[in-house]
Amino acid sequence: MDIEPEQIRRAVAAHLDDAREFLCDLVRTPSLPGEESAVTDVVAGAFARVAEVQRVEMTNTLRDDPDYSDPIPGIDYTGRSNLRVAVPGAGGGRTLLLNTHLDTVPPSQGQPDPYVPHERDGSIWGRGSCDAKGQVATVYLAMAAVAELGMTLPGDLIAHLVAEEEVGGNGTLAMVRAGERADGCIVLEPCDFKVLTSIRGAVWFRVTLTGRPGHPGRSGLNRSALDMAIRVVEILRGYHDRLLADSRGHPLFDRYDNPMPLTVGKLHAGNWPATAPGEAGLEGVLGLLPNKTAEQVMAEMTAAIAAEGGPEIADNFAIHFMYRHDASETDPAGPLPAAVLNAARAFGVDAPVDAMTASCDACFYNNILSVPTLVFGGGSLSVAHSNAEHMPVADLARAAEVLTAAAIGFCGGQP
Ligand SMILES: [Zn+2]
């Protein structure tokens, strides 16, 4: 297929205003995890102009899946759906699957007008503008460009636009369980045009400690659950240090000082200054690299707390894992990374192969469906989830150009 970069550039430019408006509509429509229905309707309406749109219903049986994440207990799936959009090919080519998410994290403290999209310094600002509504707009713009070029690609171009990525990927899990066949998958996240072929995993954990509450005057009889929780944090820090040392030797992850941090984000205990707390809970996330499975890390964390905290902790703690993602990798020399790198080169975009030091939905495609999957996208992870979240309009155009050229190159190849 002979298409010049300049033709793609013109096709993207023809729909850029439309995509920018669409992105503003998305930012204007709040979509916290579990509350994506309104934005799903907006997205379905827009994509109907450029692709076949199918609503894929979710049901509460998803909660029984062994890979289900439950940071929001009891979340209901009745009446909720993901979207599967498709630009069918003529046949004989490779199928390219795209994935990105419709949910966002809540506004950050101090974020001005999170749901009032505003354009400033060439960027669109607001919650979700880059993570990942700017990615949804990128997929839309690429599909619009393919239509504008009047092309029927040999292979299918499909996108999964999903719910609940920010709480563990339950939307993508539902799509993967529904079944999909593809020769390659690009998960779109804001990552400064890096081609991320190794993606770390993560476990989210909740540790509950049971103490023996009482008056401070009961010398020696109380057992403070708060003190136990602080000791557990120290034990987990020690475990993280050993895990990090064991995980060295990976060419892409070794560039980072700590590609798999331990973060304890929540700690609560007690209800009175002068009472030893009877219960304490802490919640956090620990990253992991491809040398370990999430299963191994969960077992080792549990064993470390039981072994190092003494009998008082060993007999009085419970641990629950809300989110369990393995790391995932695809060969950077494979046909999909090659198609993306070629496309980036054609548009003068600096797109280095790198590792992703965050966890995302790529593992479901790489590990469950065995579809070679990488992560790519415009916008910057450095502003995602922050009170300065924004998406440069130039990135929207560049990413759509690269995606369009990558789709043409990849879908034109032999499956
Ligand atoms: Zn995201």
Image (cartoon, helix red, strand yellow):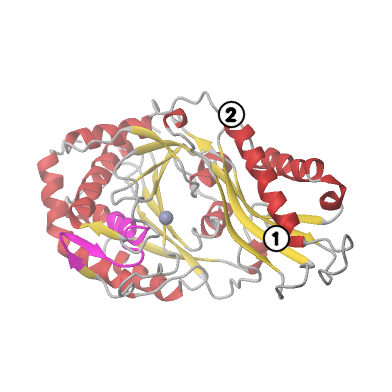
Q: Which residue is mark 1?
A: 64
Mark 1 residue element: helix
239 above or below 59?
above
Q: In the image, residue 20 lies at what x, y percent? A: 21, 64
Q: Which residue is mark 2?
A: 245
Q: In the image, residue 304 lies at what x, y percent? A: 75, 41
Residue nearer the viewer, 75 or 3: 75
Mark 2 residue element: helix
Q: Is residue 93 visible?
A: no
Q: Is residue 277 left or right of residue 380?
A: right
Q: In the image, residue 105 lies at what x, y percent? A: 45, 65
Mark whose residue sits in front, 2 or 1? 2
Q: In the image, residue 160 lies at what x, y percent? A: 43, 56
Quadrant of ligand 1 in image: bottom left
- Which residue range is magenta in the image? 119-140
Q: Quadrant of residue 112?
A: bottom left
Lower sequence index among marks 2 and 1: 1
Indicate whether residue 306 is drawn in magenta: no
Q: Is residue 6 left or right of residue 353?
A: left
- The residue lying at 80 percent from left, 67 percent from top is 278
